[in-house]
Image (cartoon, rainbow, N blue to C red):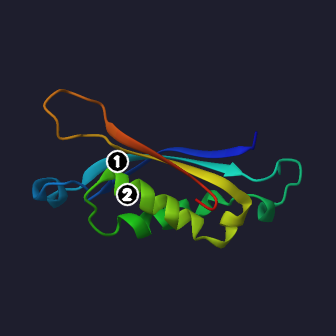
Amino acid sequence: MSDVIAVKGLRLSARIGVSREERANLQPLRIDLRFGLRERVGASESLEATFDYSVVDAVLFSVFRRPIRLLETAATVLVEAFFELPQSSALSWIEVEVAKLAPPIATPASSASIWVRREVGR
């Protein structure tokens, strides 16, 4: 079992949705991230041996700077963007949840979300 870094409850607004009406307005989102580390690095105190999660804001901004239609696309693009970082060599997998906090459905719901998990090399 690998060590896991989790960054949970990130809140942002983005233009995301299938309909023009959804994309016309900023939609509130919650993002949860989990990064599976290749090695147990807790005792080393070495940032180079782990994943520096200070890059999260820059990745979120780059992904959500343009309108996106599907939550599935947003989650997949986020995973791919994290794997493109040089420090991703410390990772064995990444898991992302993107939740729309005001889903466009008639029945009241706290959110609609997608979980995407990708392993290195897949």
Q: Position of residue 53 (x, y in %)?
A: 62, 58
Q: In front here: 107 or 1?
A: 1
Q: Amino acid at mark 1?
A: Leu
Please name the residue shown 11% across and 59% down the image. Answer: 20
Q: In the image, is 78 to the left or to the right of 41? A: left
Residue that mark 2 sits on: 74
Measured in 3D between alpha carbons, the distance from the residue under mark 2 to the one under mark 1, in whole angstroms, is: 11 Å
Badge 1 element:
strand
Residue neighbourhood size for the residue with mark 2, other residues' Cα within 10 Å, grouped as few (<14), some (14–19), many (≥20): many
Badge 2 element:
helix
Instruction: Name the image quarter holding residue 15.
Output: bottom left
Q: In front here: 15 or 72?
A: 72
Marks 2 & 1, CB-CB < 8 Å contact: yes
Q: Position of residue 67 (x, y in %)?
A: 26, 65
Please name the residue shown 39% across and 43% down the image. Answer: 114
Q: Position of residue 74 (x, y in %)?
A: 37, 57
Q: In the image, is 120 to the left or to the right of 13? A: right
Please name the residue shown 14% across and 60% down the image. Answer: 24
Q: Earlier in the sequence, mark 2 or mark 1?
A: 1
The quadrant of the picture occupied by the C terminus is bottom right
Q: In the image, is 51 to the left or to the right of 104? A: right
Q: Is residue 58 above or below residue 43?
A: below
Q: In front here: 95 or 103?
A: 95
Which label was assigned to residue 29? 1
Which label was assigned to residue 7? none
Direction top: furthest residue:
107
Q: Amino acid at mark 2?
A: Ala
